Amino acid sequence: MVQMKNVHVIVATGEWEQDQLRYRRHRLAEFLQRHPDTKEVIWLCPTPAKEGESFKRLRNGIAQWTVPDLFPQKAFRFGRYIDGFYKKKVRPFLSYLQPFQGEYTLQLWYTFPGFPLLAELFPWTKVIYDCSDLWASPMSGKQSIQAAARRNIISKAEDRIIQRADVIFCTSDYLRTRIEEKTGTKGNVFTFENGVEFELFTNSQLKKEDVLPAGFHGTVLGFIGGIKPKLDFELIQEAARKKPEWLFLFVGPDGTNDHPAFKQLLRENNVVWTGSVAPSEVPKYMNVIDIGIMPYKASQYNQAVFPLKLFEFLAAGKSVVGLHLPSTRKYAKESVYTYLDSENSDQFIRACEHLEGSKNQEDWIRERKKLAKSKNWSEVFAEMLNLV
């Protein structure tokens, strides 16, 4: 009996190249695209754009299918979670899928709780939920009437997906416990933390030029990724003022919606922000940094987060300081990863000063890389696929 090939539909938060950031879902899509049992990978996503073709073939061979939002403004994104606002819009996509039915197995991968009705509109072979965030919780931690309404809408959509899913993967034990409580079972819920494309970060000679101020030779503390309200800008500003001999480097797009605390931070002389960079350039910026920082706020949202950058910093041989990320606590190790549950800038500075002393010691660099190598994305996804 010949095994049928798979068509994988990935429900994603936005278009492939949005913000130039590569999330877990991007790596998953590319892993599935390379898999010998794959016929097609389809990236199904909402878009604020009202014009343009719904379908296009990306350079990596993945098919992208977009579903227009009600209106382009952010306030109208709630339509992604309410059936009546997208049901007609996904019909052309379902027609596109029809010829695959019977010829291939069809796997629906939710990577956020959008378009929940989709799980019921087609006879999928399997429905999978890969949960990487506490989607209904506000990233900033602020509560409001609007946030409460948003939370209610997203929670209902997510609950439907959780109840329909054949397999559920979570990026942290916090998320797993929360979903197990909702399902009342542990049988189909698994924790798979974020990984790293290890080989991309092993060449220490690749270094981005002209990033640091002319003549600067001190310690560089760096954050790489989407710059969002979940970060503690006030703490970093205090640290920057107390340690003027250090340089604080932020690499990534501004997703704060002009947050005043981020604007204020950028006024410090020893804080540099590059803006968005191409994913292929990230390893070069890693080699500019001496110590990786993940300065998250204390919030319910961050209770669930497992940051993508932890193992990337370590793969590049860099030590890391993380704040308010309980999912990472188990990886704390001398001169490898320091975990803090504190808003105290002096404690943060002391932790960084301690790591500063071992930043170039070969034994510790090997330890960091050894941990990262055990978390390669290809092995993570292969284990997940075996459970589908």
Image (cartoon, rainbow, N blue to C red):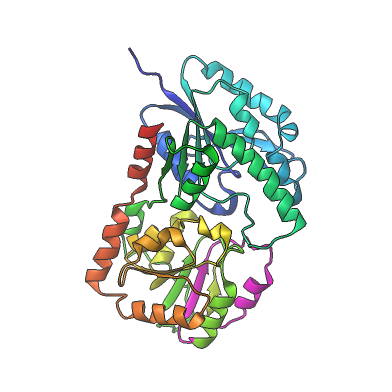
Q: Which corner quadrant holds the N terminus? A: top left
- From the viewer's side, name the closer residue of 71 and 181: 181
Assess whether residue 262 is covered by the magenta stretch.
Answer: yes
Residue 247 image position (x, y, % from top left) = 47, 79
- From the viewer's side, name the closer residue of 102 and 17: 102
Q: Is residue 285 left or right of residue 373?
A: right
Residue 157 image position (x, y, % from top left) = 64, 39
Residue 49 seen in the current view = no
Residue at the top extreme, as displayed: 1
Magenta span of residues? 243-269
As drawn, 320 above or below 265 = above
Tell me which corner region of the image, top left, top right, bottom left or bottom right, holds residue 206.
bottom left
Q: Which corner quadrant holds the C terminus? A: top left
Q: Residue at x 55, y 41 (%)?
A: 182
- From the viewer's side, name the closer residue of 24 and 154: 154
Residue 60 seen in the current view = yes
As drawn, 355 above or below 368 = below
As drawn, 209 above or below 139 = below
Assess whether residue 83 is covered by the magenta stretch.
Answer: no
Residue 295 image position (x, y, % from top left) = 50, 69
Residue 318 image position (x, y, % from top left) = 35, 68
Q: Is residue 29 left or right of residue 381?
A: right
Q: Exactly how many numbered labels are in the figure?
A: 0
Residue at the left extreme, as displayed: 363
Q: Residue at x 24, y 65 (%)?
A: 366
As drawn, 214 above or below 233 = below
